[in-house]
Image (tube, rainbow, N blue to C red):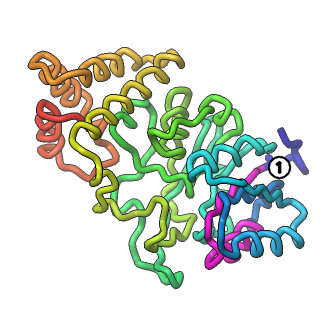
Amino acid sequence: MGSLENNKPTVTVVVATYNGSAYLLAQLESIAQQTHKPTQIIIIDDASSDDTLIVANNFSAHHPEVMLVQNETRLGYIKNFEKGMLFANAHYIALSDQDDIWMPNKLEVLISAIGDQMLAYSDSELIDVQGNLLHQKMSSIKNQLAYHTPIMYAIGAWAPGHAMLFKKELVDKAAPFPTLVTHDFWLGFVATCYSTVVYVNEPLVHYRQHTQNAIGADTTKNKSASLTLAQKKQNARARMELLYHKVKETGHQHAGVFEKINNSYQSFSLVNNCKRAKLFFDYRNLILAYKKKSALLKILFAVKMFFKID
C-alpha cells in the first residue's frame, strides 16, 4: 500500500480501456488535474485495435505516475477492471471509464466523505457524444442513496463504478470477481456486508452516453433479450445463490434473510412462491429503495414475485 505524502491519503485510479481513443485523452487529463492528485494511474487496455495505446503511451510519457498494462487477449470489462485493481498500491482506489470527464474535485470530495466506511460514490451528470450536458442526472433516473445492508442489493442497485472511491482492502474482500454480476455491483454489495456505502449528492462526473457504452444510463435496453426464459431463471437463481454465499461468508446479520430468499428461488412450488412473495413484501422498502416506485407499486412488485424471480 502506498505511503502518505504530506499526510494525504494515496489514491490509485484504474482506467479500463478498449478501443476508446476518441475520448480517452480528455478523461486522462481530467484525472491528472484533480485537486487531490492521484499517486498512481493504471491504464489497463483490453487488447484494443484502434489508437487507444498510442493515446495512452503519449500521455504516460508526460506523467510518471502512469502504469500502462496491455492485455494480449481480451478479458472483458469485469476481469479487466479486476486486473487493474489488483495492481493498485494506494490506500484508496477510484475506477474510471475511458470516455467520461471528472470534475476537478471528485477525488477530494469522495475522500472527505468516505470516513470510516469502505466505499463512497457520487451523483453524475449525463453528457452526449460531443460532451454537451443532457440536463439529466443519474439520480433523476433511479434513486441514488446510501446502502446500509446487502438486502438493498438483492435484485439491483444504482451505485455506478465510474462514480466510486473505495478502500484497497475492499478489493481483497471482493476478489475473485464473479462475471455473473458487474464489477461495480459486486464492489457495492460486498461493501455493504462490512459497512455502509456512502452517497454524495453532488455530480462529480460527466458520464458520456453513446452506442459503445459497456454499461450506460439507458435502463430501457433489455440486455438479456437474447436469453430464453429458462436461461433467465437459471441466471437469477445462480445470482441469488452467489449473493447468499457471500453474505453468509461475511457473517452479516441478514444472512438468514438471504438464505430464505435463495431457498425460495429454487423452484416455483406453491410454498416457495408464497415464501418469496412474503419476503419481498416484508423487505420491499429496502430491496426497492433504488427504484422510483410508489408504495403501491412496491406492493405490486412483491405480488409479482409470486409468479417470477428477478
User: As rendered, which of 181 and 88 lies closer to the eye?
Assistant: 181
State the image quarter where residue 99 is shown: bottom right
Q: Residues within 10 Å of mark 1 (few under 14, many from 20)?
A: few
The total number of labels drawn is 1
Q: Which amino acid does label 1 sit on?
A: Lys
Residue located at (16% from left, 28% from top): 277
For mark 1, give the secondary structure. loop
User: As rendered, which of 247 and 8 lies closer to the eye?
Assistant: 247
Q: In which quarter of the image is the C terminus?
A: top left
Residue located at (74% from left, 59% from top): 43
Tell me: 295 left or right of 225. Answer: left
Residue 57 versus residue 164 in the image, above or below: below
User: As rendered, which of 219 and 37 lies closer to the eye?
Assistant: 219
Q: Quadrant of the N terminus?
A: top right
* Residue 163 location (% of width, % of height): 56, 56
Q: Does the magenta stretch include residue 18?
A: yes
* Residue 303 location (% of width, % of height): 11, 34
* Residue 210 location (% of width, % of height): 45, 74
State the image quarter where residue 26 is shown: bottom right
Q: Give the range drawn in magenta.
A: 11-33
Residue 17 versus residue 266 in the image, above or below: below
Q: Is residue 120 magenta?
A: no
Residue located at (64% from left, 44% from top): 82
Residue located at (26% from left, 35% from top): 233
Q: Name the residue under label 1.
A: 8
* Residue 54 location (% of width, % of height): 77, 74
